[in-house]
Image (spheres, rainbow, N blue to C red):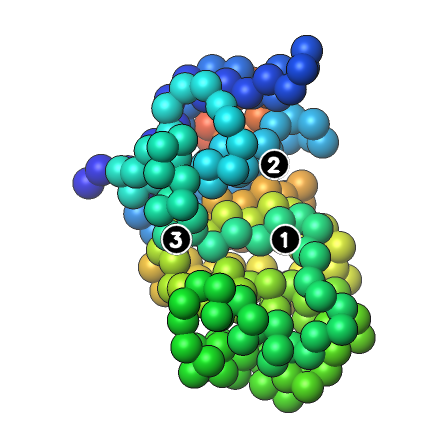
Amino acid sequence: MDPIISVKNLNKDFSHVTALSQVSFEVGVNEALALWGSNGAGKTTLLKCLLGIISFGGDIRVMNLDSRRNGKEVRRNVGYIPQEIRLHPDQSVWETACFYAAIRGVSKERSDLLLKQWGLDEARKKMVQTLSGGMKQKLALVIALLSEPPILLLDEPTSNLDTKSRLEFSEALKQLKKAGKTLIFCSHRMSEVRKTADRVLWLENGLKKMETKPDALQSL
């Protein structure tokens, strides 16, 4: 089976700084790939290149679409949760979900279904500014799933959560993988990587240091 994501010789420079250099990898359908590396390794930049929202050198294909030339089509097939979630603080959970549903061209019924599915039904009237970190992350997940994308990109999705919320969100990722989603996520938590990832792509100073299995990473 052809990979759902293919990256060949990816390069990205910012002024005089090389963020990514000659990075190549593939991701199969329903696979979970963890991006591992210290701050500044190039993980977030890689996600943005996949989405086609920044320029890059090399070749990226997502569902056989060229991310450089067909960025909008790629983004229709990808749900993205950035590390810093920025939602309008004075909107309610329901208003927020419906706002993004309108942008994505999906029904309010889809918003309603996802809020119930991810445990936000009772919080629908709450203002975003009053939500806990875990609830904001769930709302971001609802937004990412509105258009039923087959691929999810998640940038440090549990970095600002307490222990209970981290465990809940890690379990959510497992559920999404069981539902057939393809996942690429950044994490600096070994337990999270071992629990969710099929493979790990280790980046260091913009270079691919190695690809390995999660269990092998712990012994290095």
Q: Which residue is mark 2?
A: 44
Residue for point 40% across, 31% down: 68
Tell me which label, 3 or 2, sits earlier in the chain: 2
Residue 153 location, x and y as percent? 50, 48
Cα–Cα span, label 1 and label 2: 12 Å
Residue 31 visible in the snapshot: no
Q: Which residue is mark 1?
A: 157
Q: Circle 3: is it few (<14), some (14-19), or many (20+) Cα within 10 Å?
A: some
Residue for point 59% across, 85% down: 121
What element does badge 1 sit on? loop
Residue 57 location, x and y as percent? 45, 19
In the rendered image, the quadrant that contains the C terminus is: top right
Q: Circle 2: is it few (<14), some (14-19), or many (20+) Cα within 10 Å?
A: many
Residue for point 56% across, 49% down: 154
Q: Nearer the viewer, mark 1 or mark 2?
A: 2
Q: Which residue is mark 3?
A: 76
